[in-house]
């Protein structure tokens, strides 16, 4: 029986609930983060919690928990679910109930859930994926919030086009990030990724930048869409997906149309890093 943590108590997953007047339900106000385990241990737990706390600051949500409090609950939830193998750990902090049904009143709710990691299609990694582009920006760059309607609508477009993800393009024509992924491109031996200031700073993004530093030239700079389409290799990253090669953007084939050697190098490096972890 799976156990979740909800608003101060560990409860069976089927009994997990919050009041209908919570601002997460009424207004979509809340923050979240997701991490995964390797060998039963949460991967970069402190970095994920730091990002969660920073998201709270960005949306003006006062959090009564310390980083240590949340960290302790993460490890407790793993202890209370010993039958599960590798899992995703989802942390959600809601806006809480509010007298005016609009503004947070200083009573947020903390939810921590564990869910099995679904196996992703092997062909994503061996053959690469198609993505599409969409002129869209996060309403609050850098904050991981629970209001995912724009991303959900974007992913509906992707599915209709037979694509795996959507690259957001800003009003100036620069490629930023994807709905739940960070974006990278190789131009020769130089790895380029958009600067952190205008995107959600992915934890896997940070790892890839570290792994790439000893292997390639690395640049955090803007990537105009027209330049991205001329890249030798493109890939996206995320906590649950790792490194996924991109071989088509809209109607444009990238590089040779198959996963490139530099991307495969970083895929292998991330796999080794995860094993060592």
Image (cartoon, helix red, strand yellow):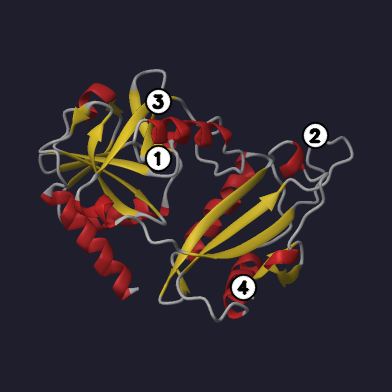
Q: Position of residue 184 (x, y in %)?
A: 27, 41
Query: Along the polypeptide, which appears first: circle 1 or circle 4?
Result: 4
Q: Residues within 10 Å of mark 1 (few under 14, many from 20)?
A: some
Q: Name the quadrant of the C terminus.
A: bottom left
Residue 77: numbered disc = 4
Relative to 153, residue 42 above or below: below
Which residue, given by chain and number where applicable, does mark 1 sit on? 196
Which residue, given by chain and number where applicable, does mark 3 sit on? 134
Q: Callout 2: helix, strand or loop?
A: loop
**CA gap, disc 3 to disc 1?**
20 Å
Q: Position of residue 194 (x, y in %)?
A: 33, 36
Point out the frontmost of discs 1 and 2.
2
Label pair 4/2, CB-CB below 8 angstroms: no
Relative to 184, residue 63 above or below: below
Q: Is residue 142 left or right of residue 113?
A: left
Q: Position of residue 51 (x, y in %)?
A: 53, 52
**CA gap, disc 1 to disc 2?**
30 Å
Q: Name the quadrant of the N terminus.
A: bottom right
Give the farthest residue toward the right.
Answer: 99
**CA gap, disc 2 to disc 3?**
30 Å
Query: Along the polypeptide, which appears first: circle 4 or circle 2?
Result: 4
């Amino acid at each position: 029986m799976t156990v979740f943590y909800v608003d101060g108590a560990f409860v069976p997953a089927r009994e997990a609930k919050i009041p209908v007047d919570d601002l997460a339900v009424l207004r979509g106000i809340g923050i979240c983060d997701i991490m995964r385990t390797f060998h039963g241990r949460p991967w970069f737990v402190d970095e994920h919690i730091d990002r969660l706390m920073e998201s709270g600051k960005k949306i003006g949500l006062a959090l009564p928990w310390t980083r240590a409090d949340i960290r302790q609950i993460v490890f407790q939830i793993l202890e209370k679910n010993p039958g599960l193998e590798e899992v995703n750990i989802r942390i959600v902090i809601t806006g809480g109930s509010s007298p005016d049904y609009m503004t947070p009143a200083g009573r947020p709710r903390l939810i921590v859930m564990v869910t099995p990691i679904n196996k992703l299609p092997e062909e994503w990694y061996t053959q690469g994926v198609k993505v599409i582009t969409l002129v869209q920006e996060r309403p609050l760059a850098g904050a991981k919030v629970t209001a995912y309607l724009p991303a959900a609508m974007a992913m509906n477009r992707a599915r209709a086009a037979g694509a795996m993800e959507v690259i957001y393009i800003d009003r100036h024509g620069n490629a930023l990030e994807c709905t739940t992924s960070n974006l990278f491109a190789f131009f020769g031996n130089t790895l380029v990724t958009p600067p952190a200031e205008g995107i959600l700073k992915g934890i896997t993004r940070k790892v890839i930048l570290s792994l790439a530093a000893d292997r390639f030239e690395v640049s955090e700079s803007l990537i105009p869409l027209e330049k991205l389409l001329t890249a030798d290799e493109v890939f996206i990253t995320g906590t649950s997906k790792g490194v996924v090669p991109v071989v088509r953007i809209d109607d444009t084939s990238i590089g040779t149309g198959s996963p490139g050697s530099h991307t495969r190098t970083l895929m292998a490096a991330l796999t080794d890093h995860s094993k060592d972890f």
